[in-house]
Image (spheres, helix red, strand yellow):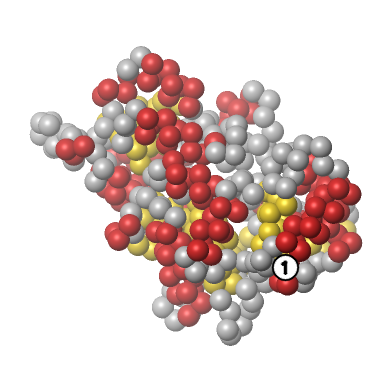
């Protein structure tokens, strides 16, 4: 069955031309992604309408151009506001237009990492001990240090957070935005640098403080919804090289996490490269645990159609426990660079088959399944 599918996205080049920085545009779509997604959908027999961003979508709705659409495939990350990833889903829900991917409520929940962790704890799914540091627009570095001490002491995880290392990042970003070499804090004397950088670059956005998870890191690909959701594969990350900053080299062990400047097609920066490889899913109990926890988290937070869950163990060696880092309800789909298509490829799926599985999951929600059949009838 074929559909008329509208694509909604922010084209990265357009926003760079408007004066947004590379970091601000890190989650936006490259031409390669838009072209690949369009090509894959058309090869599956669907008619594709390239809409553009949310303002273009609003213009289509105002003109009633959406009347011919069966589904919307949105990769929109949004630009403004902490609920920006949910803006397109919410708008589509208001107009009762079926769309691919998680609904607005689930998207908001996953985008705000503090709310994600509250939900995971409620469901008894492991996640790192944490607290939330309020970051008001008028906070200075010294004031932030005092707030940090208060946030840690008032947390239900106060004992765990009294120990180093800690890890800091903005509460509502993706694609490793806001994660720098200084995000891992090994001692009290390093707090001010991390707090100052995050509070300056992400003014008004709260800072998530977690116990550092020192074990192995995975990302798990999932397709489907509810009881039909299933793991399609997993990647594990390995770090090579020595990270150099301001002329000083830090050991690889200290930079064993993905920073925002490593989120590029080469997955490398500052002398460190990230190797993503397929681990043994059957003979490695920690990999199995990571996949099981990822699927539990995805279902618990209302994931639909497709998603990717980042997992890291609390230690290396035996007795390690997989902890959920975050849930991405709208993972990158660039076939030559994004982790999600790479997971599918390792599983033996072509890019077209991956997109087909995603669309088929969403098609369950199309009223009367009104896509066109092969002979063109309704």
Q: Position of residue 304 (x, y in %)?
A: 37, 50
Residue at horizontal 10%, vertical 31%? 377
Residue 270 against residue 317 in the figure, above or below: above
Image quadrant of residue 320? bottom right
- The residue lying toward the viewer, choosing from 91 and 273, is 91
Q: Is residue 68 visible?
A: yes
**Mark 1, other Cα within 10 Å: few <14 / some 14–19 / many ≥20:** some
Residue on which the image places disc 1: 158
Looking at the image, residue 12 sits to the left or right of residue 34; the answer is right
Quarter of the image for the C terminus: give it. top left
- In screen coordinates, is 42 left or right of 249? left
Outermost top residue? 63
* Residue displayed at 64% across by 24% down: 17
Closer-to-camera residue (45/296): 296
User: Can residue 331 be seen by looking at this rendering?
Assistant: no
Q: Is residue 231 left or right of residue 45?
A: right
Who's the residue at 35% across and 50% down the image?
A: 305
Outermost residue, bottom side: 318
Coordinates of residue 9 in the picture (x, y in percent): 47, 32
Residue at the (42%, 65%) spot, across then down: 296
Quarter-of-image position of residue 23: top right
**Up-down: is 125 above or below 202?**
below
> Along the line of sight, which residue is nearer the eye, 349 or 184?
184
Q: What kind of element bears circle 1?
A: helix
Q: Position of residue 196 (x, y in %)?
A: 83, 47
| Residue 276 location, quadrant | bottom right
Quarter of the image that includes the N terminus? top left
Q: Position of residue 227 (x, y in %)?
A: 30, 61
């Amino acid at each position: 069955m074929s559909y008329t599918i509208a694509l909604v996205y922010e084209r990265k080049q357009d926003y760079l031309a408007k004066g947004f920085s590379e970091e601000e545009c890190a989650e936006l779509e490259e031409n390669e992604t838009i072209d690949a997604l369009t090509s894959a959908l058309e090869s599956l027999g669907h008619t594709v309408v390239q809409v553009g961003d949310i303002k273009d979508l609003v213009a289509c709705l105002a003109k009633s151009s959406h009347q011919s659409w069966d589904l919307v495939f949105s990769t929109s990350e949004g630009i403004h506001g902490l609920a920006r990833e949910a803006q397109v889903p919410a708008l589509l829900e208001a107009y009762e237009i079926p769309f691919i991917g998680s609904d607005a409520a689930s998207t908001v929940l996953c985008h705000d990492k503090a709310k994600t962790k509250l939900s995971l704890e409620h469901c008894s799914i492991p996640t790192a001990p944490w607290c939330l540091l309020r970051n008001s627009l008028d906070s200075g570095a010294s004031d932030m240090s005092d707030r940090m001490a208060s946030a840690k002491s008032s947390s239900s995880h106060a004992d765990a957070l009294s120990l180093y290392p800690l890890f800091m990042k903005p509460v509502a970003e993706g694609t490793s935005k806001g994660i720098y070499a200084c995000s891992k804090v090994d001692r009290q004397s390093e707090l001010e640098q991390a707090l100052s950088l995050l509070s300056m670059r992400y003014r008004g956005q709260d800072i998530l403080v977690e116990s550092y998870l020192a074990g192995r890191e995975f990302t798990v690909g999932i397709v489907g919804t509810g009881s039909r959701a299933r793991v399609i594969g997993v990647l594990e990350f390995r770090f090579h090289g020595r990270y150099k900053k301001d002329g000083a080299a830090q050991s690889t062990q200290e930079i064993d996490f993905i920073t925002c400047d490593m989120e590029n097609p080469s997955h490398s920066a500052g002398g460190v490269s990230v190797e993503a490889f397929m681990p043994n899913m059957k003979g490695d109990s920690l990999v199995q645990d990571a996949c099981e926890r990822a699927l539990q988290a995805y279902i618990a937070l209302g994931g639909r159609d497709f998603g990717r869950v980042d997992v890291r163990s609390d230690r290396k060696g035996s007795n390690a426990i997989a902890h959920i880092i975050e849930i991405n309800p709208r993972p990158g789909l660039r076939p030559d660079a994004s982790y999600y298509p790479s997971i599918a490829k390792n599983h033996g799926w072509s890019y077209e088959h991956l997109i087909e599985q995603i669309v088929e999951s969403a098609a369950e929600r199309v009223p009367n399944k009104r896509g066109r059949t092969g002979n063109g009838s309704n």
